[in-house]
Image (spheres, rainbow, N blue to C red):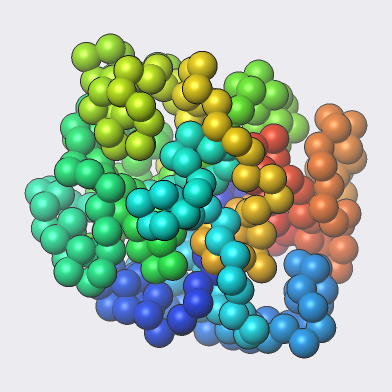
Amino acid sequence: MISAMRSVTIGVSNMDAALQIFHDVMGLAIEQRFQLTAARRAAWGLSPETRGDLVELSCQGYPIGRIRLLALDPRPREYVRLDPLMGGTDGPLDIGVKAVDFYVAAPIDRPLAELTAAGCVARSQPVRHMIGDTESEEVVLFGPDHVPLLIMIGHRHSPRSMRAGSPHGKYSEVPTISVVAGDPAVSRRFYGEALGLTAVVDDETPEPYRDLVCTLTGAPRGTRIHWLLYQDPDEPSGKILLVHFIGREGKRLVGRMHPSRLGVGLFQHSCPDVRGLHTSLVSAGARIEMPPTEVDGQLLLLVRGPNEELFEITSQ
């Protein structure tokens, strides 16, 4: 089984501008700042002349759900996902990574106001809704380089899925990242059987909240939405939420999730037996981008998920 998501890599065009949001406004702590090594550059398939500056941020040192900002030189011109509201052509229902989530304290108007004052753009007003026994208040904003960020209040969230006391700072670590999923059955096999994660939410938005959630996600009114949440059962943060728009499948963002682009480029997890995991993934028919390879003193495996996710799985 893989760990919860240790970090998410976000490609940015301007490191100082990105830090102004994630560090200065959101209060995430800078854990380390370092240069892209030649070994990792090769592992990621970047050109030999590419240089990279990385900054890892956490919520008060918490080891799960960290942000790893990556600024490349030459500067990337392509986006992982660019919403039509931001001048792009990637619809909200297109299959691929969707948004990076953070818990905030009530009232949600305060963080919404400070993020918009810092230049983020909100998709809508906050939406309060329920999925099963879970009650949330959420709003999506477009942050640095138009990456979708979701801030939320967990009015009624299970302790297994929300770290006790969240948020521990102004904003939490990344508790969840959402992905628009195509075939749910294929996703279940990959996440549950191949990666060994546990499904803790498997439900559809009830009809009374349907149009509200369509506003939140950018889906057409009346769209049925199914939610499938996977996690390490011993860790409430670093989860992956698969969102399936029933009967309204968009295009696939084929190969777009990659550290060479602006936006969410990698999900980083660990596994005590990377070679064994690789064997299992091959048997399951997963798309291996790079087999286990020694990179900067640890084994590193790159595998693409069924919804164009890109996982970087390391031995530690």
Q: What is the quadrant of the N terminus in the image?
A: top right
Total labels: the figure holds: 0
Q: Residue furthest top?
A: 207
Which of these two is toward me, 31 or 92?
92
Judge from the rendering whether residue 270 lies leftward or rightward of residue 90; answer left or right: right
**Residue 160 at x, y = what percent?**
40, 34
- Above/below status of 307 relative to 177: above
Q: Quadrant of residue 57?
A: bottom left
Residue plotted at (61% across, 28% down): 182
Q: In which quarter of the image is residue 86?
A: bottom left
Residue plotted at (56% across, 61% down): 79
Which of these two is toward me, 275 or 82?
82
**Residue 262 at x, y = what percent?**
55, 66
Q: In which quarter of the image is residue 284?
A: top right
- Above/below status of 170 relative to 245: below
Judge from the rendering whether residue 107 lies leftward or rightward of residue 296; answer left or right: left
**Residue 311 at x, y = what percent?**
68, 51
Residue plotted at (35% across, 63% down): 143
Let me know if residue 227 appears in the view: yes
